[in-house]
Structures are given as structure tokens and as C-alpha cells.
Image (cartoon, rainbow, N blue to C red):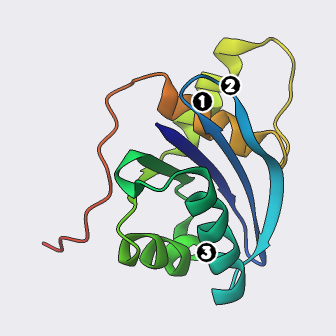
Amino acid sequence: MIYVGINVAKDKHDCFIRNSDGEILFQSFVITNNREGFETLFQRIKSASDDLDKVKVGLEATGHYSYNLLGFLLDKGLTTFVINPLHTNLYRKSLSLRNTKTDKVNPSTIAATMMSDINLKSYSNTSY
């Protein structure tokens, strides 16, 4: 399984990719919040795994800044999770007493949160 953690921001997104063995496939890298940046991310995901069914992508819920990226990932058929930032913050604190919340560390924490096998529900495009 491949885990992709994304820290969403207005103009850029910090990303991190690891596998289920904990091996870091792509150390923190930055993509722009546009189609070109999304394609760069997707190419790195594809280079990590040919089977997109074995990829889980997690983004923190940050309001409208993630909408375009979320739509792109769903269109590509990736299993995507929108995670409450409070949840990842508590998970990060459970791992260390240090205050290490930075844009570069946070995507790694998001990926680790998904690896922890908690009961996350993938995002669905269903409207009520």
C-alpha cells in the first residue's frame, strides 16, 4: 500500500509519499495549487505504484483550498480521505512530546495517520 499525505494551503501543497513498510518514497516536496502541480503529484504517485487501487491519499480539511485538488484526485480514481486537522494534531502529539508541526512535517503525519489503521472513511462525491 502507498500512503500520500498532503498539507493543503492557499498557493501550494506540501506532499509526502511512503509505503506500508514505512519506507519513504518521496521526502516532503511542494506542488503548486494548479493543474500543473496536480499532474506532478500524480506522476510521482504513478511512479510509486502501478496499481492505483493500492494508493491512499489523505488531505487535511482546510475548506475551499483543497476543492480543486480533491476533485482532481477523485477524477483519477484515487482513494482519498479528507481528515480533520484536530485528528492529525492529536495523532502527532501522541507520537512525540516535541512541538513539530510544520508544513514539511505535517504531510508525513497525515500519511502516518492513515497507516495507523484507524477507521477513516474515504471521501465520496455524494451530495445530499
Disc nearer the start of the sequence (2/3) = 3
Q: CA distance from mark 2 to mark 3?
A: 23 Å
Q: Residue at x 60, y 25 (%)?
A: 90
Residue under circle 2? 92
Whether residue 91 sits left or right of residue 117 in the image: it is right
Name the mark nearer the viewer: 1 or 2. Answer: 1
Disc nearer the start of the sequence (3/1) = 3
Q: Residue at x 59, y 59 (%)?
A: 45
- Residue 112, labelled with which disc? 1
Mark 2 residue element? helix
Mark 3 residue element? helix
Disc nearer the start of the sequence (1/2) = 2
Q: Residue at x 69, y 14 (%)?
A: 95
The amino acid sitting under disc 1 is Ala
Whether residue 64 sits left or right of residue 10 in the image: it is left
Where residue 104 appears, as percent x and y from the top left, is 85, 46
Q: CA distance from mark 1 to mark 2?
A: 9 Å
Mark 1 residue element? helix
Where residue 66 appears, as percent x and y from the top left, is 56, 71
Where residue 15 appears, as percent x and y from the top left, is 72, 55
Residue under circle 3? 65
Residue 82 versus residue 64 in the image, above or below: above
Quarter of the rendering containing residue 92: top right
Q: Nearer the viewer, residue 96 or 39?
A: 39
Which residue sits furthest bottom?
Answer: 35
Q: Residue at x 64, y 32 (%)?
A: 89
Q: CA distance from mark 3 to mark 1?
A: 22 Å
